[in-house]
Amino acid sequence: VQLFDWGWDSHGTSKSGSVDWGLHQKCLETDRAISALLIDLEQRGLLDETLVVWGGEFGRTPMQENREGKTQDYFGRDHHTDAFTMWLAGGGIKPGFSFGETDELGYATVNGKTSIYDLQATILHCLGFNHEEFTYPFQGRNFRLTDVYGKVIKPILA
């Protein structure tokens, strides 16, 4: 099952697109719902066999964004792919564990840097697939979701 929630683009171009107000509202909308999902799965004995992955395709810069050099009315941050957070729960993941570390600004990864290929390898591993054998055909040849680079992130496994 995949769930999608829009409206996380917090460049600061409007109140709803700001980090200080808009992001707070998005967190209020999702915090209780995701907590309830995890509690329900655990109470029903399903969390161990269900992998929950929460994240997006990038994070936000640690500094305020100034579009076109203008001071904005609302606080915003730009896209940032070099250091951001995702979380996984259940399905073979070690509970209450953090992996990776950024510099003091939250700008660059200094420890535990991973790639999307590593994330995909780890997800496939938790689902019982060998990511090196799991392929899909495209234009006459087989490809791997993890390319040749993906490695299972073993420290986060239960």
Image (tube, helix red, strand yellow):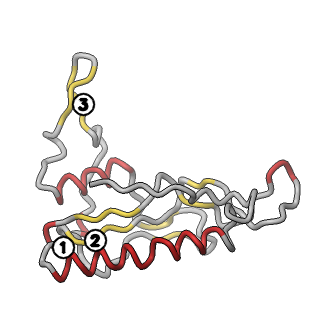
- State yes or no: discs 1 and 3 in contact (Cβ < 8 Å): no
Question: What is the distance, in whole Å, between disc 1 and disc 3 at their CAs?
Answer: 31 Å
Q: Amino acid at mark 2?
A: Ala
Q: Which of disc 3 and disc 1 is earlier in sequence? A: 1
Q: Residue at x 52, y 73 (%)?
A: 27
| Number of residues whose C-alpha sits closer than 10 Å to that of mark 2, classed few (under 14), some (14–19) or many (20 or more) | some
Q: Report the side of 90 relative to 64 (left or right).
A: left
The N terminus: image quadrant: bottom left
Q: Position of residue 106 (x, y in %)?
A: 59, 69
Labelled disc at residue 72: none
> In this view of the protein, which residue sits in the foreground, 41 or 138?
41
Q: Position of residue 149 (x, y in %)?
A: 31, 43
Q: Position of residue 23 (x, y in %)?
A: 60, 69
30 lies above or below 58: below
Q: Residue at x 31, y 82 (%)?
A: 96
The C terminus: image quadrant: bottom left
Q: Nearer the viewer, mark 2 or mark 1?
A: 1
Q: Position of residue 83 (x, y in %)?
A: 52, 61
Q: Which residue is mark 2?
A: 89
Q: Nearer the viewer, mark 2 or mark 3?
A: 2
Q: Amino acid at mark 1?
A: Leu
Q: Nearer the viewer, mark 1 or mark 3?
A: 1
Q: Secondary structure at mark 3?
A: strand
Q: Which residue is mark 1?
A: 47
> In this view of the protein, which residue sits in the foreground, 106 or 14?
14
| Number of residues whose C-alpha sits closer than 10 Å to that of mark 3, classed few (under 14), some (14–19) or many (20 or more) | some
- State yes or no: discs 2 and 1 in contact (Cβ < 8 Å): yes
Q: Which residue is mark 3?
A: 143
Q: Report the side of 44 relative to 29 (left or right).
A: left
Q: Residue at x 38, y 63 (%)?
A: 54
Question: What is the distance, in whole Å, between disc 2 and disc 1 at their CAs?
Answer: 8 Å
Q: Amino acid at mark 3?
A: Phe
